[in-house]
Amino acid sequence: MKQVPKWLGRAFFLFWICLSCYPFLWMFLSSFKQNTELFRPDRLWPQQWDFFAWQLLWKGELISLKQGLWNALYLSFGQTFLAAFLGYSYSFFLYFTKGRVKLGLTVLAVAAVVVPAQVMAIPLVQISQRLGLYDNAWSVLLTGGSTGLGVLYFIQAFKRIPKTLLDAAAIDGAGSLQLYGLFFQESKSHLLGFLLLFFMLCWHAHLLPLLLLHSEANLPLPLSMRSLLDSSLRFPRAVLMAASLFLIFPPLIFFMFGYRSLKNSLGEVLSDPDV
């Protein structure tokens, strides 16, 4: 079987890079265009490099960039760390549980993953209103953090812990807190991988904030940008292009620092440790 020539592989890789970067280049160049020019798909480069959209965005005259970006970061990181803590603790409890109780709790964790949030839309709004948490960031944090994805993830991660290490800890008389710390030490790479994975999911998921948040001061940036989308074109769409570029950097930076941990963690979690 003949191998693919190196130059052909490099050509395909370069083509893929160019194709992937084109939308970001289009958004960047569109942030300098007026509305009449922006809706010209045959014209990539702006006629004039005008920074009016960036100035409007930075001054917060149309949308609050700083508040919206802070809300997006707060909601995404909050859901991520809460899901990691609850999933880790739940999995730790399941690890030492046997019989039907373990089976029932595992089924509940799976149900929390497979049941879509759209089905729970009306109950979530009603429950948050009764608890006085509607239009409060905690309604999104508690709902988004209560997921079974972390449970399923850490159940597989805990299978990688050597049984000899646990036997030695039991001989030394380690209690629950000591074992909790031991599991944490042995699963740090998996924990970092889960944080990155779940942060990416939360950053691109806007259903819960759309359902449970109302006031402009509490909305994340992607939902704040919807106020500029109307058919009258009263607002410059270039502001949307400039704001969209800011939404790329947080997950990109987080991904660059945690990619190796995520790759190694997924490779181990998705494989069978008994094989």
Image (cartoon, rainbow, N blue to C red):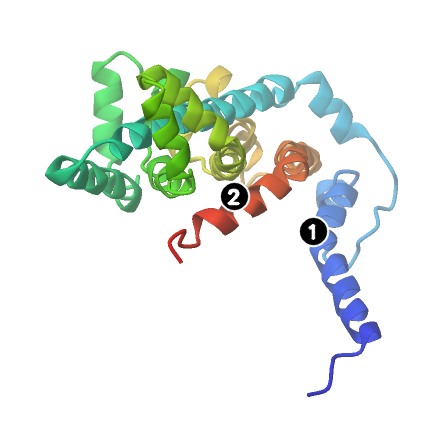
Q: Residue 262 carries which label?
A: none
Q: In this view, does 5 lie above or below 181?
A: below
Front position among marks 2 and 1: 2
Residue 163 position within the rendered picture, expressed as x and y whole percent measured from the top left: 37, 38
Considering every residue shown, the one lying at the far front of the view is 171
Q: Quarter-wise, where is residue 147 in the image?
A: top left
Residue 43 located left or right of residue 242:
right
Q: CB of mark 2 within 8 Å of CB of mark 1?
A: no
Tell me if residue 121 can be seen: yes
Number of residues whose C-alpha sits closer than 10 Å to that of mark 2, classed few (under 14), some (14–19) or many (20 or more): many
Residue 151 located left or right of residue 65:
left
Q: Count the numbered circles shown.
A: 2
Considering every residue shown, the one lying at the far right of the view is 48
Residue at which label 2 appears: 265
Badge 1 marks a residue whose secondary structure is helix
Q: Quarter-wise, where is residue 139 in the image?
A: top left
